Image (tube, rainbow, N blue to C red):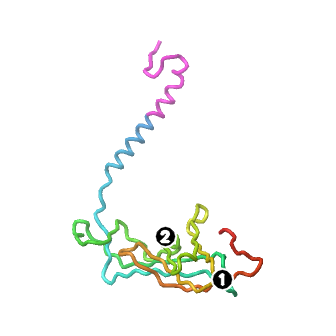
Amino acid sequence: MQFHACTMVATARRRCPKHHGIHQMQYLLILLLVLTCSCQSEPRYTYIPGQGFTQTLMVSPALPKNRDLRVGEWLELKATRTTGPWQRVKKSEDHAPGCRWTEPPPDIENEMQSSVRWHVDTKDCAVFNIPGLHNIRQRLVRFTRPGQYRLWAASSGCPPFDSNVIEVTVIQADRGSSGQAEP
C-alpha cells in the first residue's frame, strides 16, 4: 500500500491530488501578495500648489422652471471645484509647509455638492438632506418659512475656502400643497 502524507483514509486519497494543487495555488497567491506589498515603496514625488495656484468653488441651485421656490419644496444644489496648477516635486526636496498630494488632484471636479459643507444665513429655516446610497451625490435643501436666503459652501481645500454666494427667494406654499415630499 502506498502512503500519502495527506491521506489517512482510502477515500481521501482520491481527492488529495486535486486539493494538493489548490493548496499549492493558494500558497503561491499568498506569496505573490506578500512580495507585491513588500515591494511597494513611498512615492518619490509629491504635488504641491504651483506658481499662480488658484482654487474656486462654484455653487448653483436647480430652481424650478417658470415659477418660484415654495416653502417645504426641495431645492437641488450643485457644486464644481477647480484647482491648479499643481507642481510635481521630489519628495526629498519638498520642505514647504502646507498641502501636498501623492497624485495630482483633478483640475475640475464636477458633482462636488455632497463633498462640501453647506451654509445658510438663517440656519433655523433650512433643512438639508442626508445623501443615501442611491443618491450619494445629491444635495438638497428646503426652507420652512418664506423669505430671501443666502447659501454658500465651504471646501476643505488647501487652504479651506468658501464658494460664491447664491440667493434664493422662497414664497408661501399654495393651500393644499405641503410641498414636503421626501427627496
Could you tell me which secondary element the residue under label 1 belongs to?
Answer: strand
- The part of the chain drawn in magenta is 1-23
Rendered position, 36 above or below 137: above
Residue 97 in the image, given as x and y percentages of width and height = 26, 71
Label 1, on which residue? 69
Q: Amino acid at mark 2?
A: Ser
Whether residue 95 is in magenta: the answer is no
Asked if residue 137 lies left or right of residue 67, the reply is: left
Q: Quadrant of residue 142?
A: bottom right
Residue 52 in the image, given as x and y percentages of width and height = 33, 84
Asked if the residues shown at circle 2 and circle 1 are in contact, with their CB atoms under 8 angstroms apart, the answer is: no
Residue 60 in the image, given as x and y percentages of width and height = 55, 82
Could you tell me which secondary element the residue under label 2 belongs to?
Answer: loop
Chief SS of the magenta region: helix
Q: Amino acid at mark 1?
A: Leu
At horizontal 72% and vertical 75% (from top left) the residue drawn is 178
> On residue 115, which mark appears?
2
Residue 37 in the image, given as x and y percentages of width and height = 35, 49
In front: label 2 or label 1: 1
At horizontal 67% and vertical 68% (from top left) the residue drawn is 182
Q: Quadrant of residue 4?
A: top left
